[in-house]
Amino acid sequence: MKSRSDRKKVLVVDDNTVMCEVLTEFLSLLDYEAESVTDGESGLMAIENGRFRAVLTDIRMPGMDGIEFTGECRRLFPDLPIIVISGYGYEDEDTGERAMEAGASAVLEKPIRFHQVKAILEKIFPE
């Protein structure tokens, strides 16, 4: 088992606290160090203060939404991989396109398929 300081850090940004808990637990099971926040502004502060190597963010959040958050992350942290998660892919057909234009590395639709999250993170963190 890797020490906590050697683990790969991932930030989860989602206003749904249950989703934050589920994702951080899943990431921990995969041996990532995961933290979560519930809004985009807190996400930016966490990234500035931490050494996160990837971010998973929801699209729909109060205040700064996931598209704005992704764009701001890309501007401030151009090399940071950002995985955008959307529960509105079928209702809003251009959500994924807007997320990619803002700088997302990947877009996943809810319900989340954990094998997809795992595969994307394995590409980000090759062993």
Image: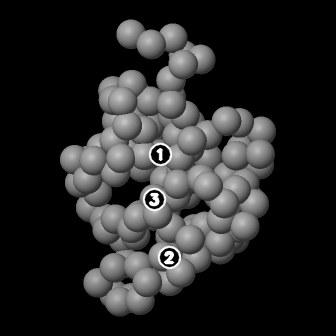
Of the image marks 3 and 1, the number of the one nearer the N terminus: 1
* Amino acid at the residue labelled 2: Ala
Residue 23 left/right relative to 13: left
Amino acid under label 3? Answer: Ile
Q: What mark, if any, has residue 64 been given in the picture?
A: none
Question: What percent of the width, then of the height, locates residue 79?
Answer: 61, 55
> Between disc 3 and disc 2, whose residue precedes?
3
Name the disc covering residue 20, or none: 1
Asked if labels 1 and 3 touch by Cβ distance under 8 angstroms, the answer is no
Give residue 114's position: percent from left, percent from top: 26, 47
Tell me the residue at 58%/76% (across/down).
102
Question: Can the viewer see residue 38 in this picture?
Answer: no
Task: Kindly identify which residue carries mark 3.
Answer: 83
Q: Quadrant of the N terminus?
A: top left
> On the rendered structure, is 75 left or right of 105?
right
C-alpha distance separating marks 3 and 1: 14 Å
Q: Nearer the viewer, residue 24 or 126?
A: 126
Q: Residue 89 at what x, y percent from top left?
A: 34, 79
Q: Residues within 10 Å of mark 2 (few under 14, many from 20)?
A: many
Numbered label attached to residue 99: 2
Q: Nearer the viewer, mark 3 or mark 1?
A: 3
Q: Amino acid at mark 1?
A: Cys
Indicate the quadrant where residue 106 lies: bottom left
Placement of the C terminus among the 4 image quadrants: top left
Q: Residues within 10 Å of mark 1 (few under 14, many from 20)?
A: many
Viewer-proximal residue, 120 or 86?
120
Q: Nearer the viewer, residue 45 or 16?
A: 45
Q: Where residue 5 appears, x then y in whole percent?
A: 59, 17
Left or right of residue 60: residue 25 = left
* Point 61% across, 40% down: residue: 52
